[in-house]
Amino acid sequence: MRFEILERDGLARVGELEIDGVKHSTPALAFIDSERYPAPKGVLKIEPPSKKGKGDLLIEPSGFSTSHHDGIEADLRPAFRGSPYAAGKYDEYLSCLTETSSMMLDSKKFVDSVSELKSGDRLIKPMYCSVMGLPHRLALLAYCGYDVFDSMPLIMAAEYGNYLTSTGILDYARIKDLPCACPACASEKRGKKELLQHNYTEALNELRLLRHTISEGRMRELVEARIRSDPWLVQNLRLMDLDHYDLQELHTPVKGAPFQAGSKESLSRPDIIRWRKRLEGRYKKPDGAGVLLLIPCSARKPYSKSQSHKRFLQAIWQSGRADTVHEVIVTSPLGLVPRELELFYPAKDYDIPVTGHWDRDEKRMVEEMVSWLVESQRYSLVVSHLGDEREPVNSVLKDFVDTSQGSPGSRESLLRLEETLRDHVPAAKSGGRHSRELADMRSLCRFQFGEAGEGLCDDARIAGRWPNLKILKGETQLGMLTGDRGMVSLTIDGAKVIASSGAYSVEIEDFIPKGNLFAVGIERAGKDIRIGDDVAVAHGKDVRAVGVAQMTPFEMELSKRGEAVRIRHALH
């Protein structure tokens, strides 16, 4: 058996499972094949040794079987469903979820088992889940990292007269007009055989959708939509976020797809929580920006391209104090977005429903973040120019000026903002726009690379026109911020600066990469690396390439196949 992960979206992955030379795309459904419940043609099957065909998963006979097959290399053993009468090792080839019936009643036990199965070398094994894989549950299970499911719950559902859909379970006998055009439903026949064939089709269709969604990087959105029909799924997702954030964050790319944040669970997405944690752990405001200006978000991203923010920027420039003003956008679900980080994912890649009403969780989150910002960054003046966010934010501010009066876009509020900045803020002493550009870039580099990022801006200058800005030291380019990516892309010289501090580095054997770097050539990878990060590829202290990480650092060290770093520049 061979398993290769081809694409990732958090813990979810599209892979290729090869058995006896036959390749199966995952997430996949493994069908129990019997006379009563025949499997469809051309699918992955689970078979005993007596019936095993090429490409099938082999299940070892139970201890109650009269036939014995000594020395067989079984992919699955009877213990994989947690039977107390089938002891023995069960995850030599597949990492298996056991005791599934008890986990259906205990969400805490379920999410803890996910964390356990994703530890050590089991991280890169295909994960097998039996009994649980109903169509509406497949998205959450795949999101938790499961790759292979069996057809047992589909058979059980047909036996009980349950018509399965991607959004829940219906009573087959009560449906007057079947909401499906599969061959079984279109046949106009009603029976257990047709119901089973429909259930098979529905599950296979959902798996096709999952593979596409993983490729698009939008699994979290799909999961948040699917869980609504099953409280057990809601519990699991919320506990995954609460109890196993570190595991999810490790696998969450730093540059993902645009998304809709339309549910309560969106507030606790791993990429959203990471944003807030990075602000609190890494962020420093730009040097010289002594005045905090709190402003609302906009529907258009990046914010500075919106008409409302263009008016804010105009008022700031007309005040003559732009170089000392630090704009920070107040928004849900991110909380706060400093202006210099507005291109960084997910600040320009989310959309939310706007009602004008903030719920209790949103208010508490913003109150805590604003309090942290004001206390940690120590501004000489705080100006609140907010709309719907005004009440929760102003409630935690002590010494501030409110220039919006709840209507930030009105002509009167904009004039009040301009006059307040002109009258209360002294003009910048020196440096001007170029000094502020470098300070903003230093803040962004620190957010992206931690303390190691500040070295990119030492004795450097900024060239270009926003959003495409180069970091230059003399005539040597160290990196470039691009509007499309929203992050600093390093050159080899920039990678040397980062690697000199030991950060964001991949250690390879003694060779120079020709093309992309595969996991087989990696000896060690920095634990600060996340998928999508720029990394230095080095042998010892010799930086030989720079590129974008395609795996987690643990996968880089464990895997023997697969692309680990997509190389941008390499030494010749």
Image (spheres, rainbow, N blue to C red):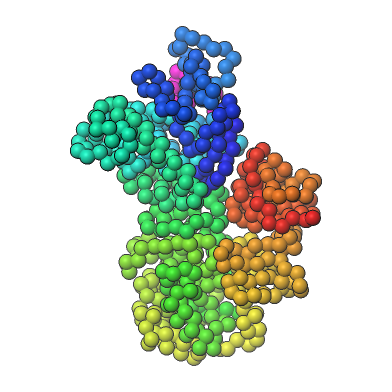
- The residue located at (65%, 80%) in the rendering is 434
Residue 555 in view (yes/no): yes
Indicate yes or no whether the magenta region holds residue 408.
no
Q: Give the x, y percent position of residue 395.
A: 38, 73
Residue 125 in view (yes/no): no
| Residue that protrudes farthest toward the top in the picture | 66
| Residue 311 vs residue 328, the one in the foreground | 311
Q: Which residues are magenta?
A: 79-91
The C terminus is located in which quarter?
bottom right
- The residue located at (74%, 47%) in the rendering is 508
413 shown above or below 110: below
The N terminus is located in which quarter?
top right
**Left or right side of 146 for 38:** left
| Residue 294 vs residue 261, the one in the foreground | 261
Magenta stretch: dominant SS?
loop
Q: Give the x, y percent position of residue 47.
A: 47, 21
**Left or right side of 242 for 438:** right
Q: Give the x, y percent position of residue 14.
A: 52, 42
